[in-house]
Image (spheres, helix red, strand yellow):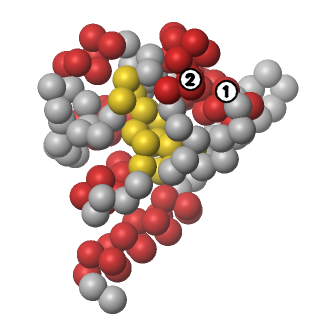
Amino acid sequence: MSALARLGAALALLAVLAPASAHAAHGGVPTVAFTVPDYLKWMIHTRQPVVVTDLRPTADYRAGHPPPARSVPVAGLVRRGGEIPPEPMVVLYCRCTLEEAASAYAYLETRGYTNHVVLQEGHDGWVRRRFPLVK
């Protein structure tokens, strides 16, 4: 197994084991699956099939986003949700509260999505790691 394949396997395991601190409760945040920025970067670098969806306002998206990201602002998710294909893996990110990200996640779940996750640390985590941005 190549070093890149071992890295991908390790990051995939980390993504699965990453703590999901959002749990459904009476009026609480729904359960959300997360992935870590390093795994998303690996997926992009190795050309794995992934739909990266930026939930931030359009102006923020234009200011800089991960290379394959598409803009579907959370404010227009119900109207524009059809622009997000249900396959392959869908990674949602924003610069918002966990509740807002969880709401977008839950909305997609009600639409039949089964392979979607929220990026831990959102856009800020991507930027802190100095991962590539497109402007």
Tell me the residue at 74%/31% (across/down). 110
Kind of residue sitting beneath label 2: Gly
Measured as percent of width and height from the top left, residue 11 is found at: 40, 66
* Percent of width and height locating residue 21: 61, 43
- Nearer the observer, 99 or 134: 134
Q: Secondary structure at mark 2?
A: helix
Front residue (pair 14, 111): 111
Q: Residues within 10 Å of mark 2 (few under 14, many from 20)?
A: some
Q: Which mark is residue 81?
A: 2
Compared with 115, 28 (above or below) is above
Amino acid at circle 1: Tyr
Residue 98 on image: x %, y % = 55, 28
Marker disc for residue 107: 1
**Can you tell which mark lies on residue 53?**
none
Quarter occupied by residue 65: top left
Within the image, what quadrant is residue 4 found in? bottom left
